[in-house]
Image: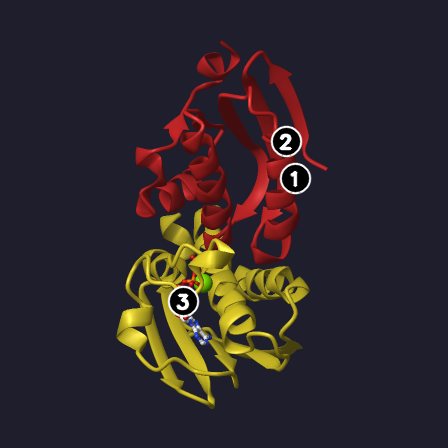
């Protein structure tokens, strides 16, 4: 179970543990359940306690990004480690997914 | 003194062993006193190669994956081998964003991640008999950390 909180049309989800191929399926299912409410316009992923991510995580995040984009919504990330930031950059995800600071995410 | 060490671990191609392989390579590399960031690089690259062996090599079947590592002075070499389906066009497979499984939300970035995080990546593969990914990374000696 992922921790999440709702603030108006924003949903903040805290990713935890390790986002690899083994965990991807359950994270995908859980995120899809959380964003199934069409009134959510911003999905904000909090990476503060995520311990690991590889290319399986890219697939999961881009898949949710496409869903949000198709409903006119957006995806943002907060508390990204430099290591995960490199993965975001090399996959071009940093061009479509907003890197927010804590203040922006709370607004 | 030139540090030398070797290890080999063989495990079944089940997804649970992706994190097992990361822990094994991190524990082995510790004797080189890598930085936190170097350890993250190595774990990520190994995770990519092992995941590929499980997801693509043994797609729908099960077999054994071999993780081998050698420390030679300041260089860590890692090899991940499967006896799975193999890759017919390695150059194409290694291109960023190339994936044979977009429907599984794969991004085709695995090899690109390995190449970014390691100094060298070489792939040898024979269709029908398996794939070996060889990677190496130089770990700066402790004094420079
Ligand atoms: N061990 C292997 N055995 C057979 N085919 C492989 C193997 N490793 C990679 N491939 C092939 O190479 C392609 C590219 O691999 P790569 O890791 O770059 O991307 P991916 O696994 O498809 O997606 P991602 O890693 O981003 O989830 C794969 O789609 C697959 O067709
Ligand atoms: Mg891959």
Front residue (pair B23, B12): B12
- The picture places residue A36, in percent across and down from the top left corner, at 60, 31
Q: Within 10 angstroms of label 3, few (less than 14), some, or many (20 or more) residues?
A: few
- Tag 3 residue: B100
Asked if one can make out residue A19 in the rendered structure from this viewpoint, the answer is yes
Chain in yellow, by letter, is B
Report the quarter where the N terminus of chain B lies. Answer: bottom left
Q: Is residue A18 left or right of residue B42?
A: right
Asked if one can make out residue B34 in the rendered structure from this viewpoint, the answer is no
- The picture places residue B119, in percent across and down from the top left corner, at 31, 63
Please report the residue visible at 34 percent of the width from the left and 82 percent of the height from the top.
Answer: B88
Name the tint of chain A in the rendering: red
Of helix, strand and loop, which one carries label 3?
loop
Of helix, strand and loop, which one carries label 2?
helix
Subunit ID for the residue under disc 3: B
- Tag 2 residue: A34
- Tag 1 residue: A30
Residues at circles 1 and 2 in contact by the CB criterion of under 8 Å? yes
């Amino acid at each position: 179970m992922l921790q999440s909180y709702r603030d108006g049309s924003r949903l903040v989800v805290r990713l935890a543990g390790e986002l690899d191929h083994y965990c991807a399926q359950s994270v995908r299912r859980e995120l899809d359940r959380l964003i199934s409410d069409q009134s959510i316009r911003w999905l904000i992923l909090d990476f503060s306690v995520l311990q690991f991510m590889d290319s399986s995580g890219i697939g999961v995040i881009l898949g949710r990004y496409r869903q949000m984009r198709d409903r006119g919504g957006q995806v943002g990330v907060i508390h990204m480690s430099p290591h995960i930031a490199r993965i975001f950059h090399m996959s071009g995800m940093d061009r479509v997914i907003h890197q927010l600071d804590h203040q922006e995410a709370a607004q | 003194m030139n540090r030398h060490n070797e290890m080999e671990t063989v495990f079944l191609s089940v997804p649970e062993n992706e994190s097992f392989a990361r822990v094994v390579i991190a524990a082995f590399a510790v004797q080189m006193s890598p930085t936190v960031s170097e350890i993250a690089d190595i774990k990520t690259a190994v995770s990519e190669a092992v995941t590929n062996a499980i997801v693509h090599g043994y797609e729908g079947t099960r077999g054994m994956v071999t993780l081998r590592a050698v420390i030679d002075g300041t260089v860590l070499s890692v090899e991940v081998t499967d006896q799975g389906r193999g890759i017919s066009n390695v150059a194409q497979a290694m291109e960023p964003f190339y994936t044979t499984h977009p429907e599984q939300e794969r991004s085709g970035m695995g090899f690109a991640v390995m190449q970014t995080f390691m100094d060298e990546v070489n792939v040898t593969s024979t269709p029908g008999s398996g794939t070996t990914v060889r990677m190496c990374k130089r770990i700066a000696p402790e004094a420079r950390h």
